[in-house]
Image (cartoon, helix red, strand yellow):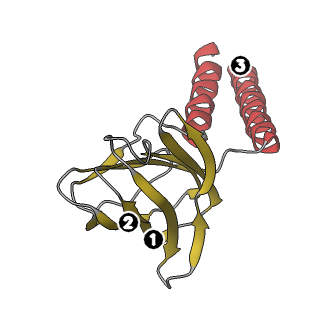
Amino acid sequence: MKSLSLSGLAAAAVMTCSLLPSQAGAVTQAVIFDALNASATLSTPLSAGDNLVLDTLVTAEVGALQQSITFTVGAGVNALTGFAAWQISTATGTGPRLIGVNIDLFDATDTLVVSDAFAGTLGGFAGSTFDSAIGPGTYKLVATGTGVRDSSLDLSLEFTGAVPEPATYALMLAGIAATAILTRRRSRSGRNCQA
C-alpha cells in the first residue's frame, strides 16, 4: 500500500511543478537594421521569459534615425525590463556617433506606455534602461535620434510573467499535504477492509 501513498505524492508533486514559472522555453526574437529609417513586424507573440533584441549598425548614411518594431505580447506577461546602448564617440572623432536617442513604447491606441530612462555614458557609449508593467496586446517600439556618423544602437527587452506570491506556495504545499493525508487514510481503510 505504500506505492499508493507514493503515487499520490508523486502526482501532487508533478501538479505543483507544472504550476511553477518556467523559463526553459524562452525565445529571443532579434531584429537587425542596417538603415536609419526602418521598421519590422514580429509575427510570433512574445511570452513570459522571451526577449526582444534590436541590433542596429548603419554605415552608409547619416541623418535622422526613425526605427520601429511592432510586436504582440501574449497572455501571462505582466512586465518588461531592459536596456539600450548606443555609441556616441567624441564629436571630433571618427567612430560611430548617434545622438539624441529616445526610445518609446506605444500600445495599439498609440498611447505612450513607457520611455527609456537615461542611465548615463561610459567609454564612448550612452545607455538607458526600461522597467514597466505591461499586459497582453499589440505594441510598437520606436527609436529616434540623429546619426552624425555611423550609427550603432543595441536594445534588449525581457518580458516577465507573474511570480507566485509566498501565500500561493503555502497553498500548494497545503494541497500536497492534504493529498498525502487522504492517500494515507485510503490506504489504511483498504487494510482494514482486507482484515
Q: Residue at x 28, y 50 (%)?
A: 150
- Asked if one can make out residue 41 in the rendered structure from this viewpoint, the answer is no
Of badges 1 and 3, nearer the viewer stands: 1
Q: Residue at x 27, y 63 (%)?
A: 36
Q: Is residue 91 left or right of residue 185?
A: left
Frontmost residue, 98 versus 43 = 98
The quadrant the C terminus occupies is top right
What residue is disc 1 on? 139
- Asked if one can make out residue 154 in the rendered structure from this viewpoint, the answer is yes
Frontmost residue, 18 versus 57 = 57
Q: Residues within 10 Å of mark 2 (few under 14, many from 20)?
A: many
Gap between marks 2 and 1, in whole Å?
5 Å
Q: Residues within 10 Å of mark 3 (few under 14, many from 20)?
A: few
- Checking the image for residue 50, the label placed there is none
Q: Are marks 2 and 1 in contact (CB under 8 Å)?
A: yes
Q: Secondary structure at mark 2?
A: strand
Please name the amino acid that badge 3 sits on: Arg
Q: Position of residue 127 (x, y in %)?
A: 54, 45
What residue is disc 3 on? 191
Q: Quadrant of residue 17?
A: top right
